[in-house]
Amino acid sequence: MKTAITPTRAEDFSQWYQNLIVAADLAENAPVRGCMTIKPYGWAIWELMRDEMDKRIKACGVQNANFPLLIPIDYFNREAEHVAGFAKEAAVVTHYRLKKIDGKLQPDPDAELTEPYVIRPTSETIIGEAMSRWVQSYRDLPMKLNQWVNVMRWEMRPRLFLRTSEFNWQEGHNVFATHDEANTDARKMHRVYGDYMREVLAIPCIMGEKTPEERFAGADHTYTIEQIMQDGKALQAGTSHDLGQHFAKSFGIQFLGTDGKLQYAWTTSWGTSTRMMGGLFMIHSDDDGLVLPPVVAPYQVVVIPITRDDTADDLNAYGHKIADKLRSAGVRVLVDDTDARSPDKMWKWIKRGVPLRVEVGAREMESNAISVTRRDIGKDSKATMSVDEFIENVHDMLSQMQSDMYVAAQKRNESMIHSVADLNELDAALNSGKVGFFRIKYDLTTNEKFDELMEKYKISRRCLDDADPTYVFVAKSY
């Protein structure tokens, strides 16, 4: 059977993913190595994802702010454990001026900065410095801040959306009077992320705490969202960190308590990024292109008039009347009234993953009807109904699609989570080509035998099992 994306997922999942991004017109590699340009359709998806996440963050009492892109290198030196995790990825600004030398613009040797700046890989340090000034007494707590920004982490093996040197994200940074409050809030934001993945992106997740070997540099506890791609690999889609008092002590975040004594605060940080988009595309899409959950689809419905030269004007007008009714009902809709061939129009929107594809031809116009097809099910779902019936039921159709996509992903996940009794069984499973997440006793992963398997199969500890933290999930990852 002919498909729009070749090779197929079964033939070469990695190349299928790259070709999917191109076919759906989402992004392209930028002139700067390791960076990407997100195209308008891809950015529209991110805006919908971002806006829904922002609502949920603000509902937790968090305020948005914005901090500098450049961070003094001295700030990183104050938190040695933290900087060790980012040192190899840091991009450094060393000059403040260019000069033409031998006919080419180059950094001016006379304009070298006294102290270099790091382009932010994350902002714990510079936000910690600000909090040390903004927090003075218990009355200033809790302080909850978030910013939507781009960050830079030099990436040696880039892949669009999944791993790029520059990416967009939100990073939250909260400060509290007690450790219990901080840890409770770190776990709360972890749950916020999990709910978002399920309810907005229709993605079931494995949620748990990172093992000490995998936790965020400088954190006491890291809580993670792990997703399973269609090829069985893991993708870390969001993390929340209990930072203890490490950053408070490094940056002097102190407050006068109710007892009048000066004490160090407790901080957290939490973040998600455009990497979520890569997970969204990998989890739901098929060999014909993108499949988008209705909640984050730029167009939830596309109306395609099936025209001939003598019917184009009337059918396009009919399509726009339907679209006007859909907009009045709060549906995001587009009428493709271009002069492209009808099959080309249909394939374009199939590849872009529009949830509901509405076709209107002369027969539909005569009977005030439409033909509608769900993107996730395809031709088997095609149905003809009156315009009024469609308008009345469109929200239910979109909600059902959102729910069905989640259930389909959940069933696939269940088939790719395996329990193994010991390292020999893990070795045998991986050697046989079995893919997915493997649940094993955590203490079995802390010896040399497991280190050998990590090297042999490129697996890692993803997170402890929330239901029983004596077990850990291990998997290959992106």
Image: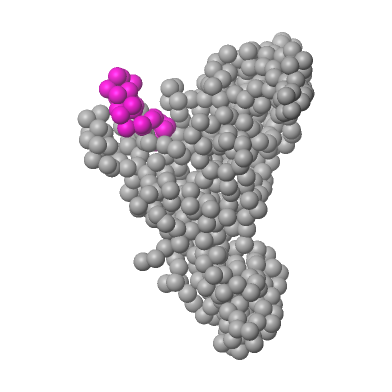
Q: Is residue 469 left or right of residue 360?
A: left
Q: Nearer the viewer, residue 443 or 36?
A: 36
> In the rendered structure, which segment of residues is drawn in magenta?
441-469
Q: Is residue 363 left or right of residue 465?
A: right
| Residue 269 % position (x, y) | 61, 28
Residue found at x 58% / y 55%: 25
Q: Quadrant of residue 454?
A: top left
Q: Residue furthest top?
A: 261
Q: Nearer the viewer, residue 158 or 329?
A: 158
| Residue 175 % position (x, y) | 66, 25
Q: Is residue 179 visible?
A: yes
**Residue 117 located within the stretch drawn in magenta:** no
Q: Nearer the viewer, residue 117 or 466?
A: 117
| Residue 448 % position (x, y) | 29, 19
| Residue 338 % position (x, y) | 65, 72
Name the quarter where the N terminus is drawn.
bottom left
